[in-house]
Structure formats: structure tokens, C-alpha cells
Image (cartoon, coloured by chain):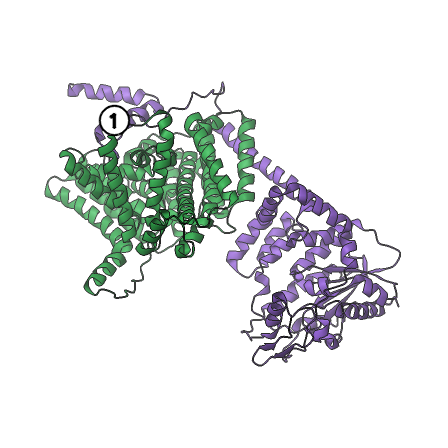
Chain colours: A purple, B green
Amino acid sequence: MNETELPGIRKAIEALPREQRRALLEWLIESERGVAVAEPAPPAIRKPKPVRRPAAPATLRQAVLWSIASIAVFFLLDAAIFRSGWYLRYLAPDSTTGQLELNVFWLRHTLPGKAPEAAVIGDSRVAEGFSARNADAGAGDRIHFWNLGVPGSSPRDWYYLLRDGDPDHRRFTALAIAMDRYSDEDGGENPSNRMSDLSYSVGRLRWSDCPDFAESYDAPELRRTVQTGCLFRGVTLRRDVQDFFAHPLARFRAAKAWRNDGKGYIDGYGGKPEDLTGLSVDFGTGAVNFPPGLKDWQKNSVNGFASSAKVPQTGALTAYRKLWLGRILDLYKDSPTRIIFLELPGGPLPPPRRETPARFIESVWRRPRVTVLPGETFRDLERPEFYADGLHLNHAGRPIFSERLGAKMAEIAGSR
Amino acid sequence: MLFTTLNFAAFLVVVLVLFYALPKPARRYLLLAASLFFYMAWNVKFVALILGLITIDYFAALWIIRRHGAPRRMALLVSLFANIGLLGWFKYANFVRETFLQLAHPGITVQPLDIILPLGISFHTFQSISYVIDVYRGEQPAITSYVDYALFVAFFPQLVAGPIVRAKEFFLDYFNWRAPSGEEWQRGIAMMLTGFVKKLICADQFAIAADRYFANPQAFPGLLPAWSGTIAFGLQIFFDFSGYTDIAIGVALLFGFHFPENFRRPYLSASVTEFWRRWHMTLSGWLRDYVYISLGGNRHGRARTYANLMLTMLLGGLWHGASWNFVIWGGYHGAVLSIERVVWGRGEKRGLVRIPLAILTFLIVNIGWVFFRAKTLAAALFVVGQMFTRTAGELMLTPIQIKLAVATLAVALAEEYGGLLTRLTVSPAWVRTVAVVMALLAIELFTASDQSLPFVYFQF
């Protein structure tokens, strides 16, 4: 080839459509290489059958609009599944989200009776250790009680449960908030960073709640995770959905049965039959002397109760309580509901009580329509025969606690 | 900033909007700034390293085209020394030091030096080396604009884990830039979604079984755990790495850049030779063009060819990581490639015979993965030993993981023989919409891990 032909060839190549130029370049590169590490052979891949293309290929503008539309459809479908309330009806009843949602469902679908209503909210110590029926009896059946205890939950979850379960904040004549202790002594974990709160509350979190909910976490790396889990409920409910797909019919049946009969079951529950009679603990050393015949779950729980390592105090619990219990108080600020704080019995034996400040309680006890029950109100129940494990009252302890609390609340609410 | 985070999604949307909103001349500045920001999101300090290398290679290439003889060669050597030297220091200093110290004082426990491996260094140094060598060979004109060259090296979709893009491929798009067609945009979206599904649903799912097994293989004696744990890793690394490159290719396509294919269903290969034509194709091509051919390729007789092949694969193994396990992995593949060449020659196998051969190839490749994944050589040898024991043991893969493996095989076959992705890309809008929505829902609901796990190839 003559060198003078090169400009002409170049021009001809430049005039080619882009795809042809690319094919030409690839061919040139291949032919220049000559050999290969893995010795290229004839085309390895069977060419796919020619595909039928639409008559007019989409323009970039159309393709971008299609992308945006597809994402919008995804958001709509996601919202239809997870934000319409449809999927929330079929959550696993024993899951974290499921338990909180069931309480909201029952509150929304149970019309108030003639008697005024009161509720006790808390974690598993209330769910397990409080009986609404016994409390009704303690109040002389003049008040109907609700057990809003959700195992493993915390004040952040209670706020969303009450916000949506009692939307006009006037349903209850009294609402008791059960605290494990009034003291604001920090424990091992920073309560603001509890990831499980997202699991409990996710069904209640609206899109507008997400920034605020995520901000309530101290750890920046958790905020991002929480924000994502809040915006895309499916991310948080992933395990539940996967379990749903594994056994859809069983889930439908279980969810329906719990919605219809769960409240009756909970109200009729009599408490755990086990007790810890014979238990002794040396709180100085953490040594536990178990009575014979205890099961592992009881021993583990008691060991947790007996260990009381002091951790550096950061004020995290005070800040957390001021934020979330403060929000609950704000919910009921202008309502007739009386808010009652109570300290739960501390365990199967009287635990050592350090002189630590109770800043949150001190900040609220003078508020109007707020009552703080004395810390020692239920301390006489701190006996092994009233406890099934290190945390929870048993079938003997729970009626006493419930009747006494019912009577107290009725007295404070003025219904007795 | 991992591709699989919402931060990256937000970053991508912002950069895309700005890219198409800005006038064309300003776009390269935007892409470079975005790429450096992307890199700095990992570590601000190391941006100086990548900019330093870019500067050296940029001037070396200009020096090469403007000088003759020794100065020209010197510029090439300076560039190679800078790239290989820094790669060597950051990646291999501890390995070399430990090897020498243990040779000198057998049994000694060597405390590693505190060296952080800069993200993507193995990839961008290879890209830079190929550019300078191509300029030296006269196969690539030197890039006169610093910004253009910096963007070639630092372009964020491929910066961290490839694909290793050659200068001629990148600048063909860059200097003839045009907006992607609607079909290309759709393909870019499809590639990205495929990548997310591969990484978040498949790779992270198989990682559960692989991590469980390789954390302590001795705890799971027997043939079944050895094979299933290793196969889990083989699937994990494929979905992880090919997922990453799918996302990278898809993202680049949205900006109008056509990155080369990096994986082409390698586990359907009917020989290890074919496997290397389909696995990490840009690295294979790089090693072929800059190592194998430079060593003489197959032009000096059979013995030299096999030696070159072996050396190339050993280097390929070492590129993946600084340990003897990676060297063995490379050597193993070099040996298998040589044996295949002797036994079968270069021909492709066709027809039904591909099925048993593909199974055999898959098993051979998985034996190699043991050395790639095991923490120590002793652990790797234990696992390989267990692969041929008579004790059955416990299957590491759960039923859902087995179903997932079967499903992915079906999709791979559909893509191989039916062009599934291409068909989807040009299918009616409603079909594409359903596919996108299903993929997004699957990512939301079936992601295997609750946390964003880094891509495996980030460590290389």
C-alpha cells in the first residue's frame, strides 16, 4: 500500500458509523496480538439468536424517562406492599415488629367499652409480669386495663406505639409507664443506638419520621443504616418477608389467628409456673447459688441479673429518657390522660441500689397530670418465689403486682 | 463509597445530572472532580499517591514521544519503576520481608509493617503501565491534556476494581464522545441491576457458607464440606467480582463510555483455557499483551511457550495477593493450561461433550480456589486433602443456597444461549419495567447481609 493512500483510508474510517469503527478497531487489535495467554481459539461463545428489536429504538430521553418511571413504579409497589398496611397485617406475630403492630391493631380495632380504660406500657417485664384482668379486679372492675408490654421494646418504640395506637391521645384515663429503675445510671449499651428499635417501630415510621428517627441515633454509621431501613421498610422486614415466602399459608393462618384471638390469649395468660425459691446471690462477687432443678434459660437470666458491673457514666440514658419519654409526655400534654411512672420490682432478690441520680424522673414529677409512684412501691415483690427468672414475675407474683398496680392507678385516676 | 450503598446512588444521580446539564467542555472537569471525590471518600491522603502516579506517567509518555534513544527508554523505566515500585511497596513489602526473614531465621514470627494498601492500586497501576508501554511501542498517541489522562486513570466506575481499561479503548470513546443511545442507557441500567443482584443477593449469600467453612476448615472434616465450602467460595467470588464489573460497566455506559466485557459466564467453560478467556478478561488480556508476549509468547518453541505460560500465570497469581497461596494458585492454573495444551491443543469443544467437560472444568477451577481462599497453605492443603477423602461430612450449602445456585445456572444458560439480557434490553417498555421493579424488590428483600459488605476484589 502506498503511504499516500493512508489519509484517504483514515477519512474513510472516520466516516464509518461508530459501531463499525469499534468493530474494526477490535479486529485490528486482535490481529496485532497474534497470540494469547490462553491461546484464543475460534469464537468461544455461541452467538445468541438474533433478537427482535422494536421498530423504533428508544431515544436517550425516552430511556431516561423510562428509568425514572420504573423507579417510581418500584416505589409505588413498595409503598403498596409495606406502607398501605397490607403486609403489616401478615407479619410474623412473634416477631419484634409483629408484636408492636398487633398492639396497634388491637387498639385501633377495639372500641372502648363503658368503663374508662387505662394502659400499662413497658418491655417484657410488663408483657410477662402484668395481667390486665388482675388489674381490672384490683380496680374493682371500674377501669378496663390494657397490657401494652412488648418484650424487648424501649421508650422509643412506646412513643410510636402510643402515637399511632391512641391517635387522639384521649383513650386512656391513665397510662402507666413501667421503668426498670428510676435511676439514670448508664448500663452497658447506649440506648440511643439500639438497632432493634428500628425493627420494632418500622411499621409505624412514616417517610417524614425517617430523618428524625435516624438522627436520634448517636452513632453516625448507624444513622445511615437506620435511614435506609426506615425509607425502605422491606430492608428492615427482610427476614420476615423471606420467612413469609417460605411458609405463606402458615403465616396467613397464624397472623389471622393472632389478630382475632391474640388479645384474648394475652389477657387470659396466667404467667410462668416456674419460681426461684432457694436462690441466693452474692452481689459483691456475682456468685449465684441456684436451687436445684432450674433450667438453662432461668440460670442465664439470673446470671445477668446478678452481674452489675459499673460502666463509665456518660449521661446517655438520661438524654435518651428525656427525649423519648419526654415525647410521650408531650403526646399527652393537652389530654385528660394521667401519666404514671412506676419502678418495677428489681428482680428475684433486692438488688444493691446505688445512690445514683434519677434526673429524668426529677425533671417530670412536678408536671401537671404526671404522677411518679414511689420507687419502693413494689419492692416487697423482690422475692424468688415471685419470679420465674432473673427478670420476670411468675404466676404467683404477677397477680399481686397487677392488682396492686390496678388499684393504685384507679386511685390516682380518681375512678375508685 | 461502595457501589452498593445509598451514598453511591445519590452520588451517581448528582454526577449524572450535572454531567448532562453542563456544556460538553466542562464535563471532563466534572468527571475528574467526581472521580477524585469518589476516591477521597475512602481515604483523602492517598489521593496524593494516585495524582503523583498520574503526573509521572503523564510526563513520561510525553517524554517518550518527544525524545529518542536512551532518554526515551529512561522515561519508560521511570514510569515502570514508579508504578511497579509503589505497587510492590504497598502490596508486597510485608510478603517479601516476611519471606526473607523466615528464610534467614526459620520459625521466627514476623510482625508485619503497618502498611495500608491503597484502594484499587493493582488496577490503576496496570492501566497506567499499559498506557505508557503502548505509547513507547507507538501503539497509542501520548495524551497531551493532563485532565484527559488523569480522567483515564481515575475515572470512578473502574478506579477501584476494574475492569482494566486500555487507553485506546477509553480514548476512542472519550475523543469521539456522544451521548449514549436509548438502548445503551437501558443496557447500562440492566447491567447495574444485574451487578447489584449478583453482589447483594448471590455473592453475599454464598459468602455465608464460604466464610463459615474457611474460618476453620478443620472443624468440618469430610468430602462434602470441602467441596461445598469451596464451591460456595467459587460462586461468591464470581458473583462478587463480576457483579462489581457489571455495575462499573453499567455506570460507565450511562456516561457514554463503553468498558470492555470482563466476565462471560466463566463457569460454563469446557476447559480451563476457555475459563481464562471468560474470567477477568481484561486482566487476562493485560497479562497476555504485556507479560506473555513480552516474554516471547509461543514464538520460541514448546518449552519456552510453557515456561512463558507458567511465568505469566504465576505473576497473575501474585497480582491477586501477596502470599504463597496466590503463587500456588497461579502456578496451578499455569500447569493446568500447559497440560490442556498438550492434551487438547487449542480447539474449542462443541456439542454435548461440553457438559461433562464443563463439570470437570468447574471442579478443577474450584480446587484452585482453595489456595485462593484458605488463610494458610496448611489450611489449603487440608481442604484439598478432604476433597479426596472417603468421609462424607456435612454439606455447607443450605437448601436456599443450593436453589440459588441452580437458579443462577439456569439464568447463565439462558444468557449464554438466548441472550437474555440483550432481549430484555430491547423488549417492550412494560416488560423492562417489570424486570427493573422485580430486580429492585429482590434487592430490597433478598439481600443476604444486613450490612454493606465490601467487594472481595477491593483487597487486590
Front-lying residue, B302 or A50: B302
Instruction: Specify the amino acid type for callout 1.
Output: Leu
Q: Which residue is mark 1?
A: A28
* Residue B133 visible at all: no
The N terminus of chain A sits in image quarter: top left
Q: Residue at x 60, y 39 (%)?
A: A75
Report the side of A204 relative to A313 (left or right). Answer: right
Could you say which quadrant of the image residue A181 lies in?
Answer: bottom right
Residue A37, placed above or below residue A274: above
Give the structural element (helix, strand or loop) at label 1.
Answer: helix
Report the side of B33 relative to A220 (left or right). Answer: left
Front-lying residue, B196 or B176: B196
Q: Residue at x 60, y 68 (%)?
A: A300
Of all chains, the one bearing label 1 is A
Residue B22, placed above or below residue B208: above
The C terminus of chain A sits in image quarter: bottom right
Front-lying residue, B378 or A193: B378
Report the side of B139 relative to B116 (left or right). Answer: left
* Residue A113 visible at all: yes
Coordinates of residue B74 in the picture (x, y in percent): 14, 46
Q: Residue at x 34, y 53 (%)?
A: B382
Coordinates of residue B115 in the picture (x, y in percent): 31, 59
Q: Residue furthest front?
A: B390
